[in-house]
Image (cartoon, rainbow, N blue to C red):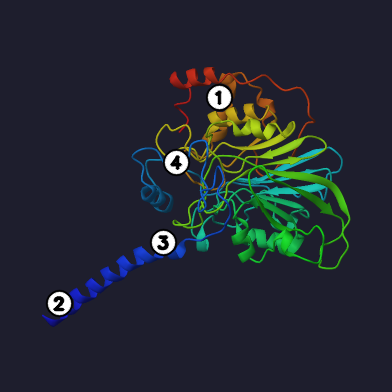
Amino acid sequence: MRPLKLLLAALLWAVVILCLGLTALPRFLDRIYYRGPVTAHFDGAHFFNPDDDDDRLPAGSSRLRLIAQRIFGDSTQPAWPDRVAIHPSRPSARVDGNAMRVTWIGHASVLIQTNGLNILTDPVWSESAGPFGFGPSRVAEPGVRFEDLPKIDIVLVSHNHYDHMDLTTLKRLWDRDKPIIVTGLGNDAPLRAAGIPGRHDQTDCGDCPGVEALDWGESTGATRFDNPWSGEAPKTPVTPAMVHVTRNHHWDSRWFSDRNRALWSSFVVQLPGGNLFFSGDTGLGDGKWPAEAAALGPIRFAAIPIGAFRFEEDQMGSGSHIGPRDALRVWDGLGRPFALPIHWGTFRLSREGYATPPRMLAAMQACAGSDPARFAPVVIGVPFDVPALGGSPSRPDMARVEACARAGRFDAFR
């Protein structure tokens, strides 16, 4: 009888401790990354999408179920390869003048070289995307080995999800290159905690590298320096660029309980030969933010996501991720620049097949009557040259795309 009482007491205490943990742990894991005045997209504690803050999963979905599917697998979803063969390239040190060369590293990591500047978006070289080494694992190696990366001048970090903010990679870049890192409000907190200083925290130089966190609509000057950075070394700026932090439609969190404590963003980099646009991770929202980015000047190149859009059968997009259909809408709103489809084929984050995003995009382009040559070849690690600014192609006929969808033209893409 006594062993049974001890067992029941132990179970009771376990339940008490669990209840206390469930009460205290979320507060403990919450992080206040940013403090500032209330704005149209910040309520004093959390950021939100001002157009329509619907980043929820579709009705009937369960976040825990989706997490379990990502961890343990789901026999009902299309199979993915365990590994995809990649042949990494070795980019040149610099691309001078108005020529522009782009290399897709994988997922949302893109290297853009132009005007003597090397710009890198959401750099992720880690094997998995998640805390403490847990999370989705790569099926494709980076398209450029880290040791073959040229010296990076500017890094754009769109938000703090693990498949976009890889602190291990960012710290390696900082230790090696001392780049300027531009991000949204609050995202500087985990970067500083990782040992990357703020640009304005340093008193030993006038225009320091380091991290700078900005609000939508704010901008900062970013330059390449000929001389390696140190606390005392002089620096010679080459080809100034203006980086604008612009609106998109998403959410963020490093844990379950710090949701929307920091800001998600897209970016426009103003350059002499035409601007580049990086969408970050985004849903469509009101669909007006691409035109807001294009209002800063003609966009020559855009990196636009097309993957991780299907969390339920036959879904064509979600509140926080666009699929190929909405990618065409974003591309149109940007002025139909030369574009690279990203955010697919590296980490499995949703239930669509491995090659579904680019195949569906090609089918929708054909249905919409848009020029497929305006989208770059989607091959990780293969550099391509971006054409100069020229005449804008015709607008995609999205009504025809919807008609094709109703007719079942895209049903084969799972």
SS at circle 4: loop
Q: Amino acid at mark 4?
A: Arg
List the residue tagged with mark 3: 26
SS at circle 3: helix
Instruction: Look at discs 2 and 1 and give the one toward the viewer.
Output: 2
Vertical comparison of 230 with 325: above or below: below
Instruction: Look at discs 1 and 3 and give the one toward the viewer.
Output: 3
List the residue tagged with mark 4: 351
Specify few, some or many for label 2: CA neighbours under 10 Å numbering under 14, 14-19, or 20 or more.
few
| Marks 2 and 1 close (CB-CB < 8 Å) | no
Horizontal side of residue 68 vs 286, given as left or right: left
Cα distance in 3D space between marks 1 and 3: 43 Å
| Marks 2 and 4 close (CB-CB < 8 Å) | no
| Marks 2 and 3 close (CB-CB < 8 Å) | no
Q: Earlier in the sequence, mark 2 or mark 1?
A: 2
Residue 27 coordinates in the image, percent (x, y): 43, 63
Vertical comparison of 298 with 200: above or below: above
